[in-house]
Amino acid sequence: MTGKGFSAMSILRAHKVKLYRSTTGDIVIFSILAVIAAFMAMPMVYTIGNAFKPLSEIFIFPPQFLPRHPTMDNFYDLFVLMGQSWVPISRYLFNSLLIVALGTAGNVIFGSLCAYALAKHNFPGKRAINQAILLSLMFAGAVLLIPHYLIMSYLGWINTYWAIIVPAWGATLGVFLMRNFIEHMVHDTLLEAARMDGASEWQCYWHVVMPIVKPAWLTLIILSFQQLWADQGALFLYAEELKPLPYALSQIIGGGVGRAGVAAAVTVLLMAVPITVFVINQSQIVETMGTSGITGE
Amino acid sequence: MRLSFERQKKIGGFLFTLPFVIGFFLFFLYPLIQAVIFSFNELVLTSTTFELQPRGWENYRYALQVHPEFTRTFVEVMVQLLTRLPLIIAFSFFAATLLNQEFRGRALVRALFFLPVIMSAGIVMRLETSDYSVIMLEASRAGAIFGGNALRSLLGDSGYMPTWLLDYVVQAAESLPVVIRSSGVQILIFLAGLQSIPREIYEAVSVEGATPWERFWLITFPMLSPLILTNVIYTIVDSLTAMNNQLVVLIRDTMLRGAGYGASMAMAMIYFVAIAIILLIVYRLISRRIFYYV
């Protein structure tokens, strides 16, 4: 009996090492990944290359991936142009960061709160809300622009940050995603156990549900971040000092062909932020409670 | 005692959903109702505000019978979706399982797969339109079409394949670059799902002697099946409501410089109902086959 248990343990140990490891498998996986990743990376490599090319090289045909005479001129030009802007560039950056931070935080917190209730509670009107969420996902945002503007105008939010931030809080994709994860990944028994021990609903949400679905809300942060980061606020923000960074930069590069190099530099800067966030975010996922907390009944 | 606990849970449920519900009414339902009203009217701007002139079903008749491109684009968009949907789901599932392996620089490679989503957002996309990446995309598409033709002559000559299947295979090969590019979010969703599967289960079946193949089909696949539904819905919604979807472009053009706002809202409503029907069918089909762990 003990012998059997022991051998099971050793198999387990052997497999723990092997679970995600096999040499041929690794080679195959790496080569497949490398091919697709190269395909994905090409436009970015080209743009980064452009950012370091002198203007004379940008329009060479056939296009070159790497600059022959790398230069930082485009970035210098960009900083000079930024320095000349009427509203200091730091103000645009502040606007962007404020919108992105508040919008994303609200989206994740309100979305997951709602999702928790929808996934693990029973209350009248739950079905209706679930259907409403699906319903609102189906509608292209572009179509609702005019009614959207009218509402902001009734609320007196035109030309305030709220016109961008608050709608992000009600973005349904977050609720939809989080609900599906919480419903399928969080064990009811775990919640019951927590309630037995006297946890309040808030504690259940914050200490049980959220740690388990950490991969899900990390994903939601990325989605929300990159959407808000790209937002130029064109429809709702008119005051120059309220506009976000992408708007300011798109103005700078609107100066025609001569700014092609600067445009590439802008693209690199604007892309660098979401990519950095993405990489940091994805390396946060180590082992969540869902993968370490409960063993089967 | 029990009743009050249940009551408490209900109130908790209400409170937790409240912020979202308020936002939903304000920023979605109300605009939607207005859009429905607009679709039966013509919007006329006056010097200070706007007026509605009732037109009954005229806008809908216009969209379906008069507008030269609406119905054709509508059919095209739907066919395109049906071809790409299974491919996107299969590819993102495959890519997610690969990206979930442990290797150095994993976060970076994941970022590469997510890159198209970042690049297609806002300013970056506008910058790119005049750029080399467009040439790249065109080139890869041309390559895919070339490959598709080769595939057609290869498979077509053998004569084993029914025509509809052959058409599908060729079309699938041709849209591969687009498929890879539009799988970014789906890959992330599957990845998050993979990371949420308790590792103990894998260890347990490994003890029982399951091969990797069995582990995949007996654990990974059923555990991820709820997210397949999530991703199918996301893919349908994402590709049908994207800013550069042909039909959305057509509706927006109609709104801004075509037959007017009322007509464009009528088109949007027809489109909306179609999407709803598709989602309903898909939901019915898939939700029965899902494995429920909880």
Image (cartoon, coloured by chain):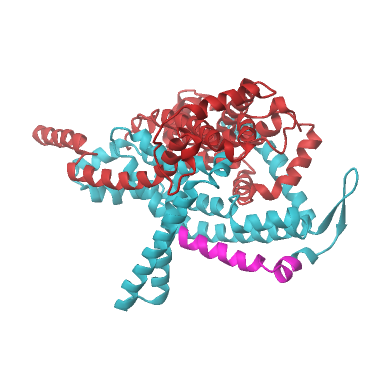
Indicate the position of residue B76 as horizontal and vertical percent values.
56, 65
Q: Nearer the viewer, residue A199 or A278?
A: A278
The chief SS type of the magenta part is helix
Of the chain colours in the picture, the one used for chain B is cyan
Find the residue positioned furthest to the left: A3
Asked if one can make out residue A122 in the rendered structure from this viewpoint, the answer is no
Answer with left or right where residue B77 lies relative to residue B67: left
Indicate the position of residue B9 as horizontal and vertical percent values.
58, 33
Q: Name the quarter where the N terminus of chain B is drawn.
A: top right
In percent of the image, x 31 and y 45: which residue is there? Answer: A33
Q: Nearer the viewer, residue A97 or B275?
A: A97
Asked if one can make out residue A203 in the rendered structure from this viewpoint, the answer is yes
Of the chain colours in the picture, the one used for chain A is red
Q: Residue B99 lies in what quarter of the image?
A: top left
The residue stretch that appears in magenta:
B61-84
Answer with left or right where residue B52 lies relative to residue A84: right
Find the residue positioned furthest to the front: A56
Look at the picture and state if B267 lies above or below A156: below
